[in-house]
Image (cartoon, coloured by chain):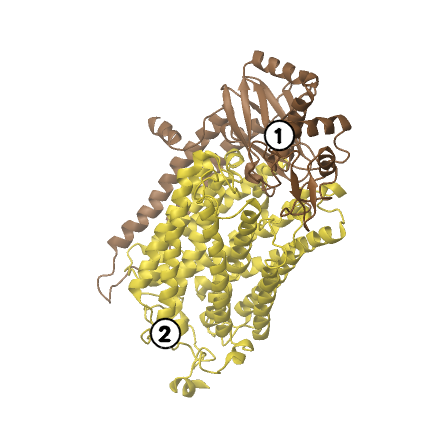
């Protein structure tokens, strides 16, 4: 079976983080080998024939072979058998992939432009980071608040669309500790390629600690809470906070207290009220050079306390 | 007409003069050339966009300068959308049937023209009107939905999707009209003695394609109209905010667009059958198998659309059924591949540039085919879906397959169409650059997909950098190849030597008339007494 393992090693698949990943790679390894053989037969046969039967004179006589029933039956039948076998094998693995284990740890995942919002049963929320205990069945309940996204963890060989207006689910049982990439695989607009998260597999003890600490965040200082909220609402996908570089919207780094030029030349000082207005009515006063209608309104989505925390956080970015 | 006219050097090119005579022509050959010029133009535009995308992906955006050719994600998404929409709706779908099909289908049958010459002209105007509408969005509000217009993104993005969708709708009408014309022509206008089983395989392929065009395109039309209605009136079919189902759109969309994949590839298979037979100077192996496998593929292609949606949230049972039927499509496709290779066996092979393209087709299509099987297998597709593996696979099939065949067919019939020979060395050079460049561009993308790089990404993690670099360099080789190709064509038309009636020694009917053909194709109506590949 050495050739088989060799094919698997050459398949360029990322680390196998689950048992299912191993099964998928076995099937893929088998297909790689069969495909390679098929290509060698077809392409090799073609190359051999064109050289062997290269035209020698302008009056070459060629064989008149219009068909060969036995041969044709054979080369239809053999691929058919291989295809059916591969289909059955695939069906078996897929069945395991799609049968949700009972008593799995359930985590809600909400896709939005352009971040993954994760909520645990105890109410703790995180963004772009899923933390799960090792060797445990985990079920992710996916949905989306705007357009279709797709939750993809290459190392686990799992992918599932997050569709607005309904729940979809996937499950996995991570066998390796470590950090793995989460990509959004369904095209979702401007920052589609920036919608990257990480999946952290930790020990059960670390996981318990992580959840507990998360729950305690209510007692954090105002600016710290603002920072969490800033991450949670995915503000960072459009506003940079540690450099003046422009992402989609203006940078907030050392912005508080400075003067901004609006469209049409009017000026405004970035103070508490301007920040408040920009969060609730983003299109009211747009800084010159930025398009209208890009930032969604947060009117009705955050309360006064959260608003205070956010404003305090932006202030803290200027050291004030 | 008759003998007299062609003896005087009259042909379809000089039969009438002036731009107006072209714009009002009902001659299928002239309409084919008009399609050729417009499709080549769109190919150029779509190609430039592809090069821009590849330049952007040369390096991750953390690298200053090179990685930032397109200013931001929005511009990238727009370029991506136009590249896809133009290449699909304006190049590959109409490509072979509208250019080479229009030109050669009636001649292959020994007919004077298609069944409805005026509808044929109308279809060109439909195509142009649709294309104009679609291109107009480029100057109003650029669309960024991707060529698939998936809801609810396409409903929410504040761009002129409606205009684009209307353009695609009208281009679809052009496709239906061409299909209708071909079906009637095949059934009604065959020359005496030309039974269905004496038709060249290119005609069989076009015939199967025409059936698909007639049956599938209206579904796309309805889907696009519903999408427009959703966008304008908010009727609540696809938008979950209004109680609609976004996955329903995908069902509708792929019910057309999967058969459309075969609208793109079947004509290419037809051309390859012609090229392999002619340049091996041998009767095609398994004529009936090839002819009927085209029909078989066309029929089955209606029942496999769900394989685009294995991870969309459709039921697992649906996934299993679609996976099963999709595997079955592999069989007739494999049969064709074996038949072509068997045709070369004991033949007398000449390596002229059209044959090189045909062999290139076999090479690339073999890879495109086996990777297609991988994608049909459920658990593997879950990993590969919407990654670069898919990008590589469909480029191997659609570009490696269709465009190789289109180029090969174009060189093959060039002497007949223009009455001139092209420079063979230049044509071979163009093949080498396109073939090598193609593999350098797209093979690394299989690996990128296996590694997990999703498609439609403006930027990527550093682990994917090297392979993206190689891929971008490959795109420059393809560009070089097509520039050589363009030069060969222009040079051939302007300064090529006069072409003989039958430069390749082929047996099909188009080679039994002068190069270029007279206005009504034949001086004397041909009578057919044997099959199309009787090299004895």
Q: How many marks?
A: 2
Mark 2 and mark 1 residues within 8 Å of each other at the beta carbon: no
- Give coordinates of residue B271: x percent, y percent: 42, 60
- Give coordinates of residue B110: x percent, y percent: 46, 74
Report which colour depicts chain A: brown
Q: Is residue B486 left or right of residue A297?
A: left
User: Is residue B79 shown above or below A189?
Assistant: below
Identify which residue is drawn at 62% across, 40% down.
A250
Per the image, the residue denoted by label 1 is A318
Identify which residue is drawn at 63% across, 15% down.
A213
- Give coordinates of residue A211: x percent, y percent: 63, 16
- Give coordinates of residue B528: x percent, y percent: 42, 73
The label nearer to you, 2 versus 1, is 1
Residue at the limit of the structure toward the left, as seen here: A56
Please rate how many residues cluster around mark 2, counting C-alpha atoms within 10 Å: few if below 14, some from 14 to 19, many from 20.
Answer: few
SS type, badge 2: helix
Let me know if marks 2 and 1 both belong to one chain.
no
Q: Hey, which quadrant is residue B180 in on the image?
A: bottom right
Identify which residue is drawn at 47% across, 41% down.
B389
The image quadrant where one finds the C terminus of chain B is bottom left
Q: Which mark is residue B494?
A: 2
The answer to whether residue B176 is seen in the rendering is no
Report which colour depicts chain B: yellow
SS type, badge 1: loop
Q: Numbered disc 2: what chain?
A: B
User: Is residue A252 shown above or below B532?
Assistant: above
User: Is residue A89 shown above or below B219?
Assistant: above
Distance in Å between CA atoms under marks 2 and 1: 69 Å
Q: Numbered disc 1: what chain?
A: A
The answer to whether residue A286 is seen in the rendering is yes
Identify which residue is drawn at 63% across, 38% down.
A113
Q: Nearer the viewer, residue B185 or A68?
A: B185
């Amino acid at each position: 079976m050495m050739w088989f393992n060799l094919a698997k090693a050459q398949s360029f698949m990322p680390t196998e983080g689950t048992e299912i990943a191993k099964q998928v790679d076995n099937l893929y390894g088998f297909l790689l080998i069969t495909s390679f053989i098929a290509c060698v037969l077809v392409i090799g046969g073609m190359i051999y024939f064109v050289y062997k039967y290269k035209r020698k004179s302008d009056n070459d006589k060629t064989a008149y072979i219009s068909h060969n029933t036995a041969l044709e039956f054979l080369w239809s039948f053999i691929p058919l058998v291989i295809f059916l076998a591969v289909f059955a094998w695939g069906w078996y693995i897929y069945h395991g992939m799609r049968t949700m284990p009972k008593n799995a740890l359930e985590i809600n995942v909400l896709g939005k432009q352009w971040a993954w919002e994760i909520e645990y049963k105890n109410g703790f929320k995180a963004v772009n980071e899923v933390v799960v205990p090792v060797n445990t069945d985990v079920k992710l309940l996916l949905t989306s608040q705007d357009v279709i996204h797709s939750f993809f963890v290459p190392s686990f060989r799992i992918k599932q669309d997050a569709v607005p207006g309904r729940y979809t689910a996937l499950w996995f049982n991570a066998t390796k500790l470590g950090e793995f990439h989460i990509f959004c695989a369904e095209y979702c607009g401007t920052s589609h390629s920036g919608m990257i998260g990480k999946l952290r597999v930790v020990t059960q003890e670390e996981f318990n600690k992580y959840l507990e600490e998360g729950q305690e965040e209510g007692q954090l200082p105002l600016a710290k809470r603002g920072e969490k909220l800033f991450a949670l609402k995915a503000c960072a996908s459009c506003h940079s906070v540690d450099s003046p570089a422009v992402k989609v919207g203006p940078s907030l780094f050392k912005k508080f207290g400075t003067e901004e030029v609006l469209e049409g030349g009017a000026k405004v000082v970035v103070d508490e009220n301007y920040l408040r207005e920009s969060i609730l009515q983003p299109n009211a006063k747009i800084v010159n050079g930025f398009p209208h209608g890009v930032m969604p309104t947060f009117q009705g989505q955050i309360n006064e306390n959260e608003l205070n925390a956010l404003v305090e956080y932006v202030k803290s970015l200027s050291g004030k | 007409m008759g003998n007299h006219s062609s003896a005087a050097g009259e042909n379809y090119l000089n039969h009438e003069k002036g731009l107006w005579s072209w714009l009002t022509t009902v001659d299928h050959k002239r309409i084919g050339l008009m399609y050729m010029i417009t499709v080549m133009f769109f190919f150029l535009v779509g190609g430039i966009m592809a090069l821009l995308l590849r330049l952007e992906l040369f390096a991750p955006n953390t690298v200053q300068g090179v990685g930032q050719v397109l200013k931001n994600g929005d511009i990238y998404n727009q370029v991506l959308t136009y590249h896809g929409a133009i290449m699909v709706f304006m190049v590959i779908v109409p490509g072979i049937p509208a250019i080479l099909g229009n030109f050669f289908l009636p001649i292959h049958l020994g007919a004077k023209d298609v069944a409805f010459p005026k509808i044929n002209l109308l279809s060109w105007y439909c195509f142009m009107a649709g294309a104009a509408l679609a291109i107009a969005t480029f100057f109003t509000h650029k669309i960024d939905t991707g060529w698939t217009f998936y809801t609810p993104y396409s409903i929410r993005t504040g761009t002129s999707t409606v205009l684009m969708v209307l353009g695609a709708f009208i281009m679809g009408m052009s496709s239906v009209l061409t299909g209708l014309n071909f079906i009637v022509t095949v059934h009604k206008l065959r020359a005496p003695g030309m039974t269905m089983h004496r038709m060249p395989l290119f005609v069989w392929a076009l015939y199967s394609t025409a059936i698909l065009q007639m049956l599938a395109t209206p579904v796309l039309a309805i889907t696009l109209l519903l999408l427009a209605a959703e966008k304008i009136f908010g009727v609540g079919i696809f938008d979950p905010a209004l109680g609609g189902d976004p996955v329903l759109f995908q069902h509708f969309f792929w019910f057309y667009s999967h058969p459309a994949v075969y609208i793109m590839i079947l004509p290419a298979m037809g051309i390859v059958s012609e090229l392999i037979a002619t340049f091996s100077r041998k009767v095609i192996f398994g004529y009936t198998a090839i002819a009927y496998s085209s029909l078989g593929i066309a029929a089955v292609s209606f029942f496999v659309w769900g394989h685009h949606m294995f991870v969309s949230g459709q039921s697992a049972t649906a996934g299993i059924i679609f996976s099963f039927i999709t595997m079955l499509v592999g069989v007739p496709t494999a049969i064709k591949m074996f038949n072509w290779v068997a045709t070369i066996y004991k033949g007398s092979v000449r390596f002229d540039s059209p044959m090189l393209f045909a062999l290139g087709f076999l090479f690339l299509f073999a890879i495109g085919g086996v990777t297609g099987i991988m994608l049909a297998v459920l658990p593997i597709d879950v990993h590969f879906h919407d990654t670069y593996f898919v990008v590589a696979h469909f480029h191997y099939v659609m570009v490696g397959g269709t465009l190789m065949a289109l180029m090969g067919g174009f060189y093959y019939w060039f002497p007949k169409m223009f009455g001139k020979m092209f420079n063979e060395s230049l044509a071979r050079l163009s093949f080498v650059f396109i073939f090598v460049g193609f593999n350098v561009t797209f093979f690394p993308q299989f690996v990128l997909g296996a590694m997990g790089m999703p498609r439609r990404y403006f930027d990527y993690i550093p682990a994917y950098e090297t392979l993206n670099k190689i891929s971008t360099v490959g795109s420059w080789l393809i560009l070089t190849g097509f520039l050589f190709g363009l030069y060969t064509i222009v040079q051939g038309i302007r300064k090529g030597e006069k072409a003989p009636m039958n430069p390749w020694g082929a047996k099909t009917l188009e080679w039994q008339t002068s190069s270029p053909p007279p206005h009504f194709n034949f001086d004397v109506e041909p009578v057919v007494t044997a099959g199309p590949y009787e090299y004895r």
